[in-house]
Amino acid sequence: MKKFIFISGGVCSSLGKGVTASSLGALLEGRGLNIRMVKCDPYINVDAGTMSPFEHGEAYVTDDGAETDLDLGNYTRFTKSHISKINSMTAGQIYKAVIEKERSGRYQGRCVQVIPHITNEIKSRILAVANEDADTDVVIVEIGGTVGDIESIPFLEAARQIIHEYGRKNAISAHLTLIPEVGGGELKTKPTQHSVKAMQEIGIQPDVLICRSPEMLDEETRQKIALFTNVDLDSVFTCRNVDTTIYEIPLMFFDQKLDQVVLKKMGVESRHANLEPWYSMMERHRAREGKVRIGIVGQYVDLHDAYKSVYEALFHAGVECGVEVELVKIDSSSLEESDNADSLLGSAPSVNGILIPGGFGKRGIDGMMRAVAWARKNKIPFFGICLGMQVMVVEWCRNVLGWADADSTEFNEDTKHPVISLPEDQGTMRLGLGESAAAAETHVFAAYGKSQVWERHRHCYEFSNKYRADISGSGLKISALTADGGLVDCVEWPDHPWGVGVQFHPEFKSKPTAAAPLFRDFIVTAKGISG
């Protein structure tokens, strides 16, 4: 029978349920189990696609084009679990599906209620993930929000029902709480006790308790927590605040035997653990020497999670290249206020590379344009992703081709040179996995080692084919097209150490044990520039 692990959180939000779920998934994979991951988000939005990055962080895109919560990015980075549209559900999706069924008469005139109709819809989607692949052993379900939130109740009730129906050997609860530190460094367990009590009141007795704490809990504190929460002493674990990287958390849990306890509770025979890729990655992380400073010129730099996958991909590349990557976050609007980009980008200590990530809207575009021109003229490694590539094309057309009014129709519908525009036959957005064909003797081909490139897209506007001949004739290299040759996916600067723009998002497939090829080569070049 399939096994289920429900990850919930208490006391406060942002404790790290996604990283905890991902770390447990990595440990179980290390034990040879096939896992699947599910994220349940309590918000009423149908998905994260229309939510502001300032509000919710990045929208993580799957191969099949789902715009999901950023925690699914953690699932991808930590585990081998296939992530698609069915691995993400929101309250908005659930209620929308139930209402559509009611409107079509599927409930035959019965009164539609949270129990059983909403909870049944949640359960059916969780079970669909479990049954999609016959080889699946364990489904890890992360329930967003905090116990006690009214929005989370239907999801917790669905979890309670599955635990009851499948039995405690086949479905368990792992609850993440906070152990705060008050004056004098004293750790307080009372919030955790109240959080577990709230779980018990809705009918779920946590099997495993994971306590987020500034330091490792001592035996006396663990005994106290176990006594007042009805959780076995060997099932009380610490998630200590890490100083360096979240990727040490799986090994922290492994040292505490979290995976062994979970396997025992689920009645799964213990098996050899192979965590060599994680140990090897952490050794490379500790062995890094030197530093490269990468300027991130973006619209949403005030919120770290807005570019979460980009930052993680830069970290992965640094580990693989043996160098620390220092992020220099620059609000693109600030460059609009300065007459001299060198004052922000080139003053000591200067950046060793510039990256412009994706985004929407006109805010800060002129600042991005200045950063692109500065990197091009000063031979500084440059990486433009999605919007970053489009700005790269516009800057080239303005300052090299001499089309002063060149622009994207996203920013200026009346421009006489719409070098970036919205194709009439594309629809609203190019979303999900797409194939690109890289040209020989380009940085893109060198990074992937082949012409066939598969990466994920999330954008509306495209390089305008009307100007393809003029732009390539002026020297800007078109380094990759869509597989059918219909659209431009990558461009590169000539006579430059490394100036690459890509329409897709390579950050979404990067892992700590396998850096994204383009991020790796970008950091390799920046490392050489830094000396």
Image (cartoon, rainbow, N blue to C red):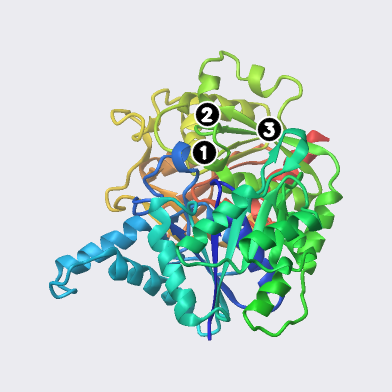
Going from N to C along the chain, the mark reached first, 1 or 2, is 2
Q: Residue at x 58, y 45 (%)?
A: 308
The local crowd at label 1, few if under 14, some if 14 to 19, many if 20 or more residues have their Cα within 10 Å, is: many
Q: Is residue 75 above or below residue 190?
A: below
Q: CA distance from mark 1 to mark 2?
A: 8 Å
Q: Amino acid at mark 2?
A: Met
Q: CA distance from mark 3 to mark 1?
A: 15 Å
Which label sits on residue 368? Answer: 2
71 left or right, relative to 412: right
Q: Amino acid at mark 1?
A: Gly
Going from N to C along the chain, the mark reached first, 2 or 3, is 2
Q: Amino acid at mark 3?
A: Ile
Going from N to C along the chain, the mark reached first, 3 or 1, is 3
Q: Nearer the viewer, residue 101 or 326?
A: 101
The local crowd at label 3, few if under 14, some if 14 to 19, many if 20 or more residues have their Cα within 10 Å, is: many
Q: Is residue 469 above or below residue 233?
A: above
Q: From the image, tell me which residue sits under label 3.
A: 380
Q: From the image, tell me which residue sits under label 1.
A: 388
Q: Residue at x 31, y 47 (%)?
A: 423
State the image coordinates of residue 152 (x, y, percent, origin top left): 42, 56
The local crowd at label 2, few if under 14, some if 14 to 19, many if 20 or more residues have their Cα within 10 Å, is: many
Q: Are marks 3 and 1 in contact (CB under 8 Å)?
A: no
